[in-house]
Image: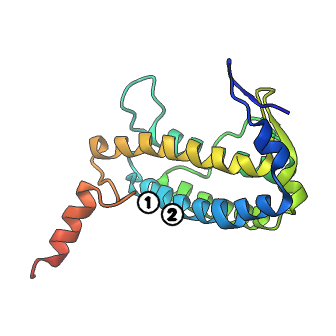
Amino acid sequence: MGVMLGPHAVRYSGLMESLRPEQAHFLLHGVQLPALKNEHALTMRVIHAIPPDKGDYRPEPIAKSALELAWHIASSEMRFMDAVEAGKFDFTPNPRPDTIKNSADLAAWYSETFNKHLDAVSKLSNDQLLKVVDFRGIIQLPAVFYLNFLLHHSVHHRGQLSTYLRPMGAKVPAIYGESYDSAEARKASLQPA
């Protein structure tokens, strides 16, 4: 069984047919869950860095606002984890709840919802992890592979969101090592009072 990604055929046939249950278990517990926890913490730093009164900031008129982009990251992660849990994608629209008015509200929702999903995903059987899941008729992969898509999608959009921070007057947190702002904060903390 091959997998096609977009107009260019990319085949995973050998990988999919040869993936064994113990490998799916290792991918989840040895690779994906630790990575998801790490990336979640980094994404939380960026969301927390959005000033609560600056969620409407957008770098240009057609761009998502900071809060819209942060919601896209958080809600997409839940959609991917839902698909891994359920063995299928549900593309029902998922608008941001009215209760999420700023970055603090979103961070609280994201943390709570992420932890529930992470717990559920961590309990999936090897058969559930190996179940082939269709993504819009374009990609068909074992469920566990979609956690990698989740990571790449979130990292991509988190990078976009981090570029919003300084122009809106916020500090860029450390993500993969120090940022200029986190380095300056560290230097300032080392200065005698």
Q: Which residue is mark 2?
A: 41
Amino acid type indicated by mark 1: Arg
Q: Position of residue 22 (x, y in %)?
A: 81, 64
Residue sitting at x 29%, y 56%: 179
Q: Which mark is residue 45?
A: 1
Amino acid type indicated by mark 2: Ala
Assess disc 1: are there few (<14), some (14-19) or many (≥20) residues with their C-alpha within 10 Å of its C-alpha.
some
Please report contact status of discs 1 and 2: CB closer than 8 Å, yes or no. yes
Asked which secondary structure carries label 1, the reply is helix
Residue pushed farthest right? 127
- Which corner quadrant of the image does residue 173 belong to? bottom left
Q: Is residue 118 above or below residue 73?
A: below
Give the camera-side residue of 20 and 141. Answer: 20
Give the camera-side residue of 12 and 150. Answer: 12
Q: CA distance from mark 1 to mark 2?
A: 6 Å
Q: Position of residue 108 (x, y in %)?
A: 57, 62
